[in-house]
Amino acid sequence: MSETRSDGELLRAVAEDADRRAFEELYRRYAPWLTARMRSRCADAGIVDDVVQETFLAVWRGTARYRENAAAAVGAAGTSSGARGDAAGWLWRIASRRLIDALRGVGARGRLRQTLARLRHRDEVSAEERVLAEVEHGDLAGALVRLSPELRAVLQATVVDGLTTREAAVLLGIPPGTVKTRAMRARKQLREALA
């Protein structure tokens, strides 16, 4: 009968020796607990399973570092700066940040794709749609319709979906500087149209 290793010993064995048995023991010890905690935060079992898997992959690949008695301050989970303290809390921090990233990506990307798909199939706004939009939504709706699709997409991502410049850049496939420029141009055009 073998002696039960501490979390710190398991994590050191995984990090230093790529010890598969230590990794499996760590996984058996914490995966069910982590999955249950994540499911209390997210009802989508598929996303939760992906997040738990990504968390343990980060541990296995060494992209997340755990230092049981480190003097360094707790860094961002998933970074090489490391963390100190209890292994469960450390795994929870990694997983919760990955869950937030996953939820932001799913929601924002899906909404933006739907909006862009609608706009792509809508080359010219009919006169009736313009009148209805101005009646229903006033001058802002008309000003938004007159923006180019590129400027509308940036406003959708940054203003409506609340993405950061960097997140919008990744989503739209353009550099962050271009996102900032397009957002500035869109706001300027809206101000002029509404003045």
Image (cartoon, helix red, strand yellow):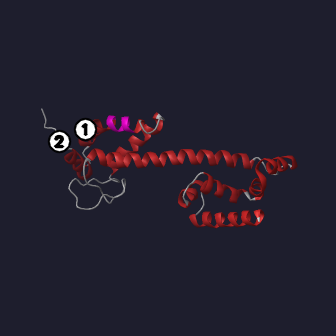
Question: Which amino acid does the dot numbered 2 rest on?
Answer: Arg
At 78% across and 47% down in the image, what residue appears?
136
At 29% across and 44% down in the image, what residue appears?
88
Name the chief secondary structure element in magenta. Answer: helix
Q: Residues within 10 Å of mark 1 (few under 14, many from 20)?
A: some
Figure check: 33 above or below 157: above
Residue 34 within the magenta-colored segment of the rendering: yes
Q: Residues within 10 Å of mark 2 (few under 14, many from 20)?
A: few
Q: Is residue 32 visible?
A: yes
At 83% across and 50% down in the image, what residue appears?
130
Question: Taking 147 as reference, is 173 left or right?
Answer: left
* SS state under label 1: helix
Residue range corresponding to the magenta coloring: 32-37
| Horizontal and vertical percent position of residue 80 | 33, 58
Q: Quadrant of residue 41?
A: top left
- In the rendered structure, which disc, 1 or 2, sits on the residue that comes first in sequence? 2
| Label 1–label 2 contact, CB within 8 A | yes
Q: CA distance from mark 1 to mark 2?
A: 9 Å
Residue with the mark numbered 1: 25
Question: Which amino acid does the dot numbered 1 rest on?
Answer: Glu
Residue with the mark numbered 2: 5
Q: Quadrant of residue 111?
A: top right
Q: Quadrant of residue 74?
A: bottom left
**Which of 40/46 is in front?**
40
